[in-house]
Image (spheres, rainbow, N blue to C red):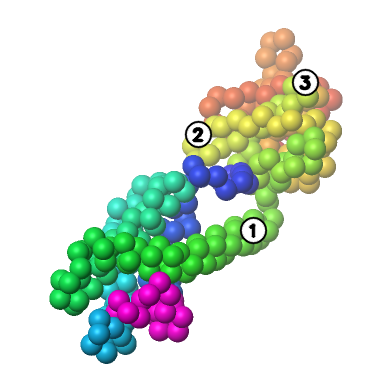
C-alpha cells in the first residue's frame, strides 16, 4: 500500500471524503436547519414578503420550505451515493453535483411558492427569487460541511500514517516528502545519477517511483526498516528475497519472490546477506 501526499486539485479523487452515508447526512441536516434559521431570524432577500403572501402564513411556509430543502437534499444525496458508490469522481464532478442540488432545491421551492401564491406571478419569477435562497443561503452550510469533511479526512489519513510504524517517508533533495511507502511492499531500490528508483508492490503489480535523491541520503531510514545494501547501487528488501544464486562466472544475484527479478549482490556483502535470510 502506498500513499502519495499531493495538493488538492480539481482532478483529485474525492470518493473517500464524500461517498459516505454520514457525509450526506450532515449536508441534509445542517443545510436545512441553517436555511430555516436564516429565513426566520435574518429574513434576507425579501423572503418574509414572499412567504407571508399577505395571509400571515410566514412561519408555516418557512417550515414547509425547510421540509422541501431537506427532502430534496435527502433524495439527491441518496442518488449521489447510489450513482457514485463504485465510480471514482473528482472535484469538478462533485462541485457540479452540488450546483445541481442547489438548482433543484430552487426549482421545488419556486413550485411551492408559485402554487401557494395563487399563481399571481410567473413561475420563473419565483425561480429567480428562490435561487437567491438556495445559492446564497445554502452555500454557507455547504462550504462549512465540505471544509469540515476535508479536514477530518486529512486528520484521519495523518493518524493512519502515524500509527503504521513500517512506513517510510521518502523525501527529495530539498527535503519535501514525495512518496510514503510501507517497508513491507518495497522490493528494491536502485541508484542512478542524481536519482534513486524505488520498486514496490501495489497489490500484485510491481510499480516504480523515481526520486530525486541519493542512496546515501536515504540510507538511514531504509536500513532502519530492514532494507539491506547488497550492492553499491542497490538496496534489497530481505523479506522478498527467495534465494541467492551464483552463476558459472561467479556472479551473485538475489532472486526476488515476484516477477523473476534478480538483483546483483557484491561479494563483500554476500555472506552477511546470506546470514540474514
Quarter residue 57 falls in: bottom left
Q: Residue at x 74, y 26 (%)?
A: 195
User: Nearest the camera: 146 or 47?
Assistant: 47
Number of residue marks: 3
Q: Main secondary structure of the magenta part?
A: helix
Give the spatial CA distance, label 1 vs label 2: 26 Å
Tag of residue 59: none
Secondary structure of residue under mark 1 = helix
Between circles 1 and 2, the one closer to the viewer is 1
Q: Residue at x 32, y 87 (%)?
A: 59
Give the spatial CA distance, label 1 vs label 3: 33 Å
Tag of residue 193: 3
The tag earlier along the polypeptide, 1 or 2, is: 1
Give the spatial CA distance, label 2 vs label 3: 26 Å
Examine the structure image and report whether residue 48 is included in the region drawn in magenta.
Answer: yes
Tag of residue 205: 2
Residue beneath disc 1: 158
Note whether 155 is above or below 62 in the view shown.
above
Residues at circles 1 and 3 in contact by the CB criterion of under 8 Å: no
Q: Alpha-carbon neighbours of circle 3 within 10 Å: few (<14), some, or many (≥20)?
A: few
Q: Residue at x 74, y 22 (%)?
A: 192
Q: Position of residue 160 (x, y in %)?
A: 61, 59
The tag earlier along the polypeptide, 1 or 3, is: 1
Q: Residue at x 50, y 34 (%)?
A: 205
Q: Is residue 232 left or right of residue 210?
A: right
Q: Alpha-carbon neighbours of circle 2 within 10 Å: few (<14), some, or many (≥20)?
A: few
Q: Which residues are magenta?
A: 33-51
User: Nearest the camera: 156 or 49?
Assistant: 49
Amino acid at each position: 500500500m502506498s500513499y502519495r501526499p499531493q495538493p488538492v486539485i480539481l482532478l483529485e479523487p474525492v470518493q473517500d471524503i464524500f461517498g459516505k452515508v454520514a457525509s450526506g447526512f450532515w449536508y441534509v441536516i445542517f443545510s436545512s436547519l441553517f436555511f430555516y434559521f436564516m429565513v426566520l431570524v435574518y429574513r434576507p432577500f425579501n423572503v418574509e414578503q414572499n412567504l407571508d403572501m399577505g395571509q400571515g402564513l410566514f412561519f408555516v411556509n418557512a417550515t414547509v420550505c425547510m421540509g422541501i430543502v431537506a427532502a430534496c437534499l435527502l433524495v439527491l444525496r441518496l442518488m449521489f451515493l447510489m450513482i457514485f458508490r463504485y465510480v471514482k469522481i473528482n472535484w469538478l464532478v462533485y462541485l457540479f453535483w452540488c450546483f445541481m442540488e442547489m438548482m433543484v432545491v430552487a426549482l421545488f421551492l419556486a413550485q411551492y411558492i408559485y402554487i401557494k401564491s395563487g399563481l399571481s406571478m410567473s413561475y420563473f419569477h419565483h425561480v429567480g427569487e428562490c435561487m437567491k435562497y438556495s445559492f446564497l443561503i445554502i452555500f454557507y452550510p455547504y462550504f462549512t460541511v465540505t471544509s469540515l469533511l476535508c479536514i477530518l479526512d486529512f486528520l484521519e489519513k495523518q493518524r493512519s500514517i502515524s500509527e503504521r510504524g513500517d512506513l517510510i517517508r521518502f523525501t527529495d533533495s530539498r527535503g519535501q516528502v514525495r512518496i510514503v511507502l510501507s517497508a513491507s511492499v518495497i522490493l528494491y531500490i536502485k541508484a542512478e545519477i542524481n536519482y534513486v528508483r524505488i520498486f514496490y508492490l501495489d497489490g500484485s503489480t510491481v510499480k516504480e517511483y523515481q526520486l530525486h535523491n541519493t542512496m546515501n541520503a536515504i540510507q538511514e531510514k531504509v536500513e532502519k526498516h530492514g532494507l539491506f545494501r547488497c550492492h553499491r547501487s542497490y538496496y534489497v528488501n530481505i523479506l522478498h528475497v527467495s534465494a541467492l544464486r551464483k552463476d558459472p562466472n561467479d556472479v551473485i544475484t538475489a532472486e526476488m519472490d515476484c516477477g523473476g527479478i534478480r538483483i546483483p549482490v557484491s561479494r563483500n556483502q554476500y555472506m552477511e546477506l546470506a546470514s540474514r535470510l
